[in-house]
């Protein structure tokens, strides 16, 4: 390859990585956390101290429809699970359940911790209405950065793949770590760049074909691949609502072995009323989603969707979703994705550090302003995200019981923007040490806050067999130790490292007067 062509690829890789890197760091760091969505839901909202008696969906449906007839239009039930044993009915953002005496009660979700961190994953903290589309575009740039990175690294692939040269040459060490992580996890990153763009921008990408080629009928053709079945329009004719036990028995006959998760009702009590039952099948396939749609007054089956009868489009979309969210393979896949996700966050952080090192003037104490600004922005955004996510966990345990969602969201943004401001107000080396110390302290505070709030320390949780509490505590302590070690390393480099760097804390030596002036 010509040197001019290689320089072009390096330039594209660098600038695309810089443009996309900040958002992708937040997306990967938050996404790695939300891989354990169900488990963390049990951590954010501890399970009842006493066993929850089994409740039949019919009693909850009858109670809600009697108290709120408008709910017939659209409502859905979240079925009990290992980490949420209570049956919940939702409509119009309102939540209902039956208490221990079988009386209907409306309640608000105690916490939004996992949902908020998940929202960070697909919006990077931007407003939800358009943040997801920004992330979709970022994923396209991400794919371009991966492609150019492969072209750049290919000539030395086998020679430098497992090289990690630790020494005085900081840039080479970061380069080796960046290249090794990027190449070894390349299939994972390609999948995320592709799936992220499709899931975030899929409908927008279809728009030109919808009107220019398919005369406005494309969405009708692919509709059954996107959703199980289109909700039927109300007939305006009243019809008895079949007992849910009978409807679920039919669902089990059509999809044997289905583990139901959600029941979605449309126009209950109408002749065209519809139930969509969603769940999973335990089988060795990436996409294990199954769904059955049937009429709520006659029990007539409208559609059955199972892995065995997936269309090509459904198989593609459901498999892509499963790959993106790691919803297959249980704990082994979750932890593998977690490690790869954190490695991806490091990839974007290290890419920015390499850009700063590449522009360092070796023989000048005064470095280019661009390097200092990039160092401050990288510290503020990346470490602000790290500290902010830990702050959300702490707020979940220490915030007022009735206002946890408010405290969780605002704790993140307060810490995040506070870190950004601090990074720009302090020299980069000082800010790095101080912000990494903050990250360590907040990570350490997560298990401490849980202990303070619940009275259950990690050792007691281990004896009780509570793997979720133990897992959160161990990961938090591991990350706290890592951030503390990084903080000490940054401080040591600032005090004893190369003075010709934005990371140096060493002062320029005083300029001595000429000999003849001193003699005078």
Image: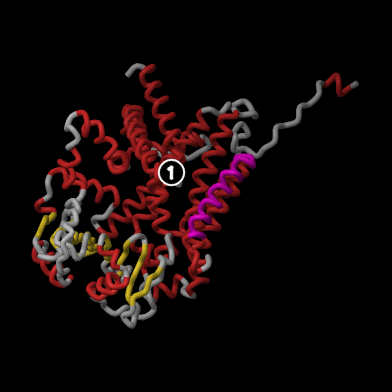
The residue labelled by disc 1 is 25
Q: Nearer the viewer, residue 381 or 205?
A: 205
- Residue lying at the far bottom of the rendered structure: 101
Query: On screen, 140 above or below 469?
Result: above
Q: Is residue 31 magenta?
A: no
Q: Residue at the spot x=34%, y=16% of the render?
A: 2
Can residue 425 be seen at all in this image of the molecule? yes
Total tally of numbered discs in the picture:
1
Q: Quadrant of the C terminus?
A: top right
Image check: 462 left or right of 412? Answer: left
Q: Residue at the spot x=49%, y=75% of the render?
A: 455
Q: Residue at the spot x=45%, y=70% of the render?
A: 458
Could you tell me what secondary structure mostly forms the magenta stretch? helix
Q: Provide the residue span drawn in magenta.
A: 406-428
Q: Which percent across, then down, holds residue 366?
A: 64, 28
Residue 71 image-quadrant placement: bottom left
- Residue lying at the far right of the rendered structure: 520
Q: Which percent across, then down, holds residue 108?
A: 41, 66
Q: Nearer the viewer, residue 484 or 53?
A: 53
- Tell me the colour scheme of the image: secondary structure
Query: On screen, 18 above or below 118?
Result: above
Q: Nearer the viewer, residue 514 or 456?
A: 456
Image check: 311 left or right of 323? Answer: left
Q: Is residue 418 magenta?
A: yes
Can residue 162 be seen at all in this image of the molecule? no
Q: Quadrant of the N terminus?
A: top left
């Amino acid at each position: 390859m010509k040197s001019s062509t290689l320089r072009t690829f390096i330039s594209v890789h660098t600038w695309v990585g810089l443009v996309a890197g900040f958002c992708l760091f937040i997306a990967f760091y938050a996404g790695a956390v939300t891989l354990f969505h169900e488990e963390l839901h049990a951590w954010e909202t501890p399970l009842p101290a006493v066993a929850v008696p089994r409740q039949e969906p019919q009693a909850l449906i009858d109670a809600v429809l009697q108290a709120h007839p408008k709910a017939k239009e659209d409502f859905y039930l979240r079925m009990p699970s290992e980490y949420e044993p209570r049956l919940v009915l939702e409509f119009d953002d309102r939540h209902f359940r039956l208490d221990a005496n079988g009386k209907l009660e409306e309640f608000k979700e105690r916490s939004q911790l996992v949902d908020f961190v998940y929202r960070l994953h697909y919006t990077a903290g931007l407003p939800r209405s358009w943040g997801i589309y920004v992330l979709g575009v970022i994923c396209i740039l991400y794919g371009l950065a991966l492609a150019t990175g492969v072209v750049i690294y290919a000539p030395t692939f086998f020679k430098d793949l497992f090289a990690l040269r630790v020494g005085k040459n900081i840039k080479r060490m970061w380069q080796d770590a960046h290249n090794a992580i990027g190449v070894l996890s390349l299939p994972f990153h390609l999948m995320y760049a592709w799936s992220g763009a499709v899931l975030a921008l899929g409908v927008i990408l279809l728009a030109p074909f919808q009107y220019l080629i398919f005369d406005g009928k494309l969405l009708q053709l692919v509709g059954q691949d996107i959703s199980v079945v289109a909700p039927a329009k109300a007939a305006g004719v009243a019809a008895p609502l079949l007992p849910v036990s009978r409807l679920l028995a039919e669902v089990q006959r059509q999809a044997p072995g289905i583990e139901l998760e959600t029941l979605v009702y449309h126009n209950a009590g109408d002749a065209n009323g519809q139930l969509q039952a969603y769940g999973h099948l335990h089988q060795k396939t990436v996409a294990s989603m199954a769904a059955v749609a049937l009429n709520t007054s006659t029990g007539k089956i409208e559609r059955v969707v199972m892995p065995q009868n997936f269309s090509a489009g459904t198989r593609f979309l459901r498999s892509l979703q499963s790959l993106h969210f790691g919803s297959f393979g249980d704990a082994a896949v979750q932890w593998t994705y977690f490690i790869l996700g954190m490695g991806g966050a490091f990839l974007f952080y290290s890419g920015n550090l390499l850009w700063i090192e590449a522009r360092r003037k070796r023989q000048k104490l005064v470095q280019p302003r661009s390097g200092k600004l990039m160092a401050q922005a990288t510290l503020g955004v990346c470490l602000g995200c790290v500290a902010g996510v830990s702050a959300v966990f702490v707020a979940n345990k220490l915030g007022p019981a009735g206002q946890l969602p408010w405290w969780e969201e605002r704790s993140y943004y307060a810490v995040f923007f506070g870190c950004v401001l601090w990074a720009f107000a302090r020299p980069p080396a000082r800010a790095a040490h101080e912000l990494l110390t903050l990250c360590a302290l907040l990570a350490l505070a997560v298990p401490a806050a849980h202990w303070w709030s619940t009275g259950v320390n990690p050792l007691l949780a281990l004896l009780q067999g509570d793997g979720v509490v133990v897992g959160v505590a161990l990961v938090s302590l591991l990350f706290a130790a890592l951030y503390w070690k990084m903080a000490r390393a940054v401080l040591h480099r600032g005090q004893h490292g190369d003075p010709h760097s934005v990371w140096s804390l060493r002062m320029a030596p005083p300029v001595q007067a000429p000999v003849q002036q001193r003699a005078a």
